[in-house]
Amino acid sequence: MKLKILPPHLRNKKRYLAFEVLSEKPINREEVISLIWGAAGGLYGSCGVSSFDLWVVKIWPCKFREQNIVKGILRCSREEVSTVRSIFPLINRYKGKRVVFHTLGISGTIKSAKSKFIKPG
Amino acid sequence: MYYDFHINNINLVEEAERLGYSGLAIIGGNQGEDNEWENWDRHPIQIYKSILIRARNPEDMRQKVKRFRGEAQVIMVQGGDQKINRAACEDPQVDILSMPYYNRKDSGINHVMARKASQNEVAVELNIKHLSRTSSHLQYKVLAHYRELVKLKRKFNFHLIITSNAQSIYDLHSPLDLIALSRCFGMNQEEAVSALSESPRNIIERNNTRNKVVVDGVKLVN
């Protein structure tokens, strides 16, 4: 049986990081996850990553000017937002092809992260 | 207002603007031959010409700095060799000492050079590409060198600047991500912001008044 959900004051506070990935080859959700977790583990280790509460909520592949762009939302703990952000500059390669992550913005809900940074206007 | 003072490709201007940079210093090899350079002052963000000097020895470095000082707004010296690191710190004509820790087991700067760098206003570069291209099991060494430089900066108050050394769009990072990363080598928020904005601006302001300085401490007003 599923556990009863925690009362609001005991739940972990979350923030949603909107990010974009530019890559030479098309990249899917599993590859995005393995890149982020790999870099986070390399920089902060298992102990550090365990406190980040990381979760890739959703990603949207889009193509712009012959460039592979993937936009996505990453959930993390409210206290560790800037630590999670610092992982992105260290990701530079995937299977020999170049890839780069940029943060688009930080938001308190998935809905506003999507409307502000992923699909503005 | 964020600046990136180590860019190797003029075609990155659009991408840098999108990421939120307001000024770039671009290392141009054959500036006359490249058509892009003809429109360099029409770009929406400020672009400065920069030259990276790779010298064999301190004497060679001094000659090259003298030769290129008039041509470029930013003069960078490739560090790594101990004698060149020291000569660059002692030369007020040099703007940035690039990667003094390159190919070394230490940070390349000691208290003597740090004091000289502070007196001569030579900024020391923290290169993000050098960090991200290092394999993950050796990144601790680079971070330790950066930490050492930050420690010396707090004591002797020379300028540190954070640069990307970008060759393609895959090397450019958003300035706020770099500020977040700088916590890993012990910089606080204000120091990181100043390394990306005030220190580069200082270099440009100093170069604008460089021609007016008669001797050390005396400046032409009109």
Image (tube, helix red, strand yellow):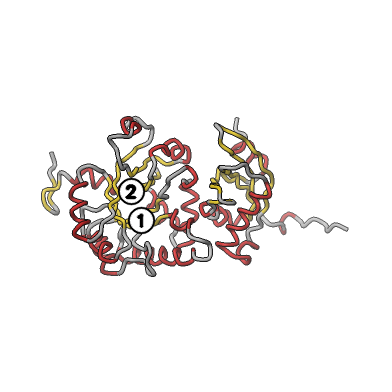
Determine the residue positioned at 14% across, 53% down: B217
Sequence-wise, the earlier of marks 2 and 1 is 1
Q: Which residue in the protein does label 1 denote?
A: B125
Q: Amino acid at mark 2?
A: Pro
Quadrant occupied by the C terminus of chain A: top right
Q: Amino acid at mark 1?
A: Glu
Quadrant occupied by the N terminus of chain A: bottom right
Left of A34 or right of it: where is B122?
Answer: left
Q: Which residue in the protein does label 2 denote?
A: B200
Where residue B130 appears, as percent x and y from the top left, is 43, 57
Where residue B70 appears, as percent x and y from the top left, is 20, 43
- Out of B186 and B78, give the one closest to the viewer: B78
Left of B184 or right of it: where is B148?
Answer: left
Left of B141 or right of it: where is B32?
Answer: left
- Out of B37 and B190, give the one closest to the viewer: B37
* Crowding at mark 2 (Cα within 10 Å: few <14, some 14-19, many 20+): many
- Say if B42 sits above or below B204 in the image: above
> Looking at the image, do the residues carrying marks 2 and 1 touch, with CB atoms under 8 Å apart?
no
Determine the residue positioned at 61% across, 58% down: A38
Where residue A34 appears, as percent x and y from the top left, is 64, 54
Q: Which dot marks residue A75?
A: none
* Crowding at mark 1 (Cα within 10 Å: few <14, some 14-19, many 20+): many
- Snapshot quadrant of residue A82: bottom right
Q: Secondary structure at mark 1?
A: strand
The chain carrying label 2 is B
The chain carrying label 1 is B
Q: Secondary structure at mark 2?
A: helix
